[in-house]
Image (cartoon, grey):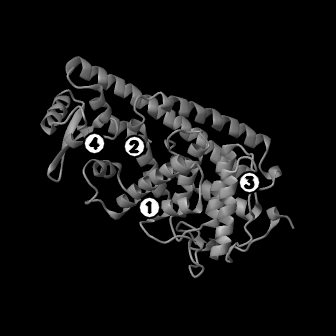
């Protein structure tokens, strides 16, 4: 029996989960190649456009936070964008548990991004670091006594029914993770298009399900970082979870089709379409933010020529700004920063708001752009 036809029972640990790669006949089809071409074109356009931004942090901070919010919503963890943006400006001491989970996802994304920049390869240790950041824990690969199962979501008659039981046992999990990591890292031995690797690797990680919790979020971070590792993106700016939220039922159904019938084609096309559509979304968002920035900068240059361009850029790093956030080597006076913010408030660029004892300023037009789905 080939590795592609190994049966499994949903209530027993899937220790026979086939290693990568899958058989090419299940992966390379005309439909997949068409979807791959479209996804690569959109992603290349996004990378080129993002590279032209004078200050990429204007985009990275906000897109990373939106990805964090969306990815946690897939796990039914909800919070408001307003609360998150405020926390980045002042502090997170007043945040509820859900909002803290979102911010931990964002920090995990940045930790993983730094690891990839420094090491250029994924390791089991790097995945564990991402998991620990997301979950705020110190453990690692789930031990054998943890009887993890995946249950059907929703409120129907079959809600709560076990639909999948991932592999169990540390050696088995580590062996499958090592195979996955080799598949991702070794482009000579596994010479596949990076986006094909992305789709296959995301399935495999979710099927291994190596941690007690947070596997979905770690898996989605893995997708973004894989694009950075393969030089498809310079920074983690693809808002991939937005697509999954809108098509969550398809996401879980297609994952299950790979597990139960080794049907790779529709799953790969789904992930390629996710890359294409979210690339197009992000391109449009960049262009909207860039146009808003240009209009705002022109207004400031005309009416407040003493305020430098770098100050205006800081208003676009995230929607809320505090006087302290404006300080740098060229602007060292807190009173001057407060004065600048007050002057831009008078122009209608900013709206003041009190958080605790501190006054912060909202770039209302940027906030509205980022709040649009």
Q: CA distance from mark 1 to mark 3?
A: 31 Å
**The C terminus is located in which quarter?**
top left
Report x, y in % for residue 159. Answer: 56, 71
Residue 36's image quarter? top right
Q: Residue furthest left?
A: 335
Q: Of circles 2 and 4, which is in front?
A: 2
- Element marked by disc 2: helix
Q: Mark 3 packing: few (<14 Cα in 10 Å), some, or many (20+)?
A: many
Going from the N terminus, do you reach mark 4 or mark 1 first? 1
Q: CA distance from mark 2 to mark 4?
A: 12 Å
Q: Is residue 212 above or below residue 308?
A: below
Q: Looking at the picture, tell me which residue is in the foreground, 12 or 332.
A: 332
Going from the N terminus, do you reach mark 1 or mark 3 first? 1
Q: Residue furthest bottom?
A: 145
Q: Of circles 4 and 1, which is in front?
A: 1
The residue where tag 4 is placed is 320
Q: CA distance from mark 4 to mark 3?
A: 44 Å
Report x, y in % for residue 125. Answer: 55, 62
The residue where tag 3 is placed is 264
Relative to 357, is 81 on the left or the right? Answer: right
Going from the N terminus, do you reach mark 1 or mark 2 first? 2
The residue where tag 1 is placed is 133
The residue where tag 2 is placed is 61
The tag on residue 267 is: none
Residue 56's image quarter? top left
Q: Are marks 2 and 4 in contact (CB under 8 Å)?
A: no
């Amino acid at each position: 029996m080939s590795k592609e036809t190994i049966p499994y029972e949903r209530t027993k640990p899937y220790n026979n989960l086939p290693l990568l790669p899958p058989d090419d006949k299940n992966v390379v089809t005309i439909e997949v190649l068409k979807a791959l071409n479209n996804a690569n074109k959109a992603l290349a356009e996004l990378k080129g456009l993002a590279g032209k931004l004078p200050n990429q942090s204007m985009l990275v901070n906000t897109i990373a936070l939106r990805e964090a919010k969306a990815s946690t919503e897939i796990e039914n963890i909800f919070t408001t964008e307003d609360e998150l943006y405020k926390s980045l400006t002042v502090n997170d001491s007043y945040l509820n548990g859900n909002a803290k989970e979102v911010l931990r996802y964002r920090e995990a994304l940045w930790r993983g991004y730094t690891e990839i920049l420094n090491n250029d390869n994924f390791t089991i240790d790097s995945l564990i670091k991402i998991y620990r950041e997301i979950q705020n824990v110190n453990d690692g690969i789930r031990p054998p006594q943890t009887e993890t199962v995946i249950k059907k979501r929703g409120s129907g008659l079959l809600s709560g029914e076990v639909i999948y039981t991932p592999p169990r046992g540390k050696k088995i999990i580590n062996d499958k993770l090592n195979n996955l990591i080799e598949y991702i890292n070794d482009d000579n031995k596994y010479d596949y298009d990076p986006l094909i690797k992305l789709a296959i690797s995301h399935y495999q990680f979710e099927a291994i399900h190596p941690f007690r919790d947070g596997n979905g979020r770690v898996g989605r971070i893995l997708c973004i970082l894989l694009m950075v590792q393969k030089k498809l993106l310079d920074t983690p700016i693809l808002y991939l979870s937005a697509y999954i939220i809108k098509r969550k039922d398809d996401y879980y159904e297609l994952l299950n089709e790979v597990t139960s019938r080794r049907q790779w084609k529709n799953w790969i096309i789904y992930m390629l379409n996710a890359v294409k559509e979210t690339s197009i979304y992000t391109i449009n968002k960049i262009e909207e933010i860039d146009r808003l920035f240009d209009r705002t900068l022109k207004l400031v240059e005309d009416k407040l020529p003493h305020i430098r361009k770098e100050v205006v850029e800081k208003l676009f790093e995230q929607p809320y700004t505090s006087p302290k956030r404006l300080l740098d080597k060229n602007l060292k006076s807190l009173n001057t920063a407060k004065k600048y913010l007050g002057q831009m408030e008078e122009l209608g660029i900013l709206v003041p708001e009190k958080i605790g004892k501190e006054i912060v300023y909202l770039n209302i037009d940027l906030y509205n752009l980022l709040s649009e789905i």
